[in-house]
Structure formats: C-alpha cells, structure tokens
Image (cartoon, coloured by chain):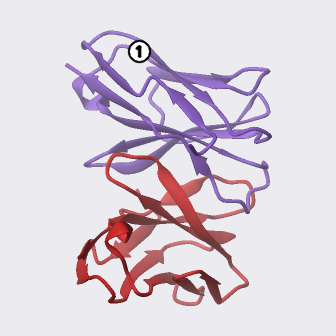
Chain colours: A red, B purple
Amino acid sequence: SQQGEEDPQALSIQEGENATMNCSYKTSINNLQWYRQNSGRGLVHLILIRSNEREKHSGRLRVTLDTSKKSSSLLITASRAADTASYFCATERTSGSRLTFGEGTQLTVNP
Amino acid sequence: DSGVTQTPKHLITATGQRVTLRCSPRSGDLSVYWYQQSLDQGLQFLIQYYNGEERAKGNILERFSAQQFPDLHSELNLSSLELGDSALYFCASSGGVWGGYGYTFGSGTRLTVV
C-alpha cells in the first residue's frame, strides 16, 4: 500500500493563481520529497524537506512539514500553464530506505 | 536529459515472453532503483541496488529479477509476461546508500503485453 495519500486527487486552476497540494503519511520519516511528472514522462525531483525542518522554499515552491500530524503541503505560487502535471509526495522512512510514493495530485493550470 | 538512460523506450510483446529493460544511472550515482507505474497500482517500488549489491526488495514478483553490473548499469528481467504486467517501468538513481537525497529518474520504458 502507498505510504502517502494526496489531496486533492485533481486540481484545476487559472494561470496566476496559487495551487496547494497536501500529503499525509502513516509512519515516522527521515525526509519527505515532492516530484513532478508530466504525462507519461519520468519524475522530476522538486524539493526535499527533512524531518527536523518545518518549511522550505525553492523558487515558486513552498513546502511545509508537520511531523506531529504526519502531513506536508506543497504550494506553487503564481502558477503557469507549464506547471500542468502530476505531483507526487514521497517519503523516506529511514536513512537509506527506498522512497514510497503517494497516489499523486493531477494539477491543471488553464491559460 | 536527466542523466539516467533507460532503453528501450517502448516495448510491445506477447504474453509468456521475456524481456530485459536496461538502465544506466547518472554518472557518479551508486544506487539504482526500479519502480513500476500502473494506473491501478500507482508507483510501486520493485528493487534497489547499491554498488552492485541488492539493497532492498519491494513488491517484485518472482517472475521478475534484476541485477547491477560492475559498470553500475542495471537490468530488469521480466519473464512469463502477463497482460497485467503492462506498465511504465522506471529506473532511478541517487548518490548514496544512506539516503537523504532526491532521486533522478529516467524517462521510463513503456511495456505493453498483448
């Protein structure tokens, strides 16, 4: 079974709006990562947040992590049509263990 | 180009056949991971190798096997193929066995079993 569950499953917004995706997981983790996948293509690593971090920024991306609630959120600000893709959270439970992926959120940004 | 090379990109084969998927990791990465992505199962971890040795095993069927060679490229062998094996197979690599790094994914092999 998947470690992470993402919410919403699908999100449709207008260009320029912000997009927020949430991820919940079940066990303690070493770090949580977010990936983007364009249709049928490989996954691209976006950002990694460690279990002792609460917030991280990278360009238009902002990730938060709440280990007490076992949840994370990914905020994409000022979205663009090119941001249209599926976004996955992935957790690494312990150092060196494999990543376990959530079900993903399909984001559509309308021009 | 992510630096992880997977071949072939597409594969169409009949049930009962055997195929080999190949992956060359990003230069300098010692860990290779194989994932299967299907519509109903999502991204499922299959197996991990680190510097030639099997490191972790996930939901990999007995009909499937993998190995990592001294030059660090890896192969995933799928045999006695069934219709349900149709999926995208991804290889990913990372810099260390101790984790804490993002993965670099290849563009995948789309396997269609007919």
Q: Residue furthest front?
A: A111
Query: In the rendered picture of this protein, how many numbered marks are placed on residues?
Result: 1
Mark 1 residue element: loop
Q: Nearer the viewer, residue A97 or A75?
A: A75
Q: Residue at x 73, y 84 (%)?
A: A52
Q: Is residue A111 left or right of residue B92?
A: left
Figure quadrant of the C terminus of chain A: bottom left
Q: Residue furthest top?
A: B17
Identify the residue under disc 1.
B79
Q: Residue at x 23, y 25 (%)?
A: B83
Figure quadrant of the N terminus of chain A: bottom left
Label 1, residues with CA under 10 Å away: few <14, some 14-19, many ≥20? some
Q: Is residue B39 left or right of residue A89?
A: left
Q: Is residue B99 above or below residue B82?
A: below
Q: Residue furthest left?
A: B114
Q: Is residue B1 visible?
A: yes
**Residue B6 coordinates in the image, percent (x, y):** 53, 30
Q: Is residue B39 above or below residue B100?
A: above
Q: Nearer the viewer, residue B93 or B35?
A: B93
The amino acid type of the residue labelled 1 equals: Ser
Q: Residue at x 64, y 64 (%)?
A: A93
**Residue B104 coordinates in the image, percent (x, y):** 61, 49
Q: Quadrant of residue B47?
A: top right
Q: Is residue A43 above or below residue B27?
A: below
Q: Is residue B56 visible?
A: no
Q: Residue at x 50, y 83 (%)?
A: A71
Q: Chain of mark 1?
A: B
**Residue B39 coordinates in the image, percent (x, y):** 26, 48
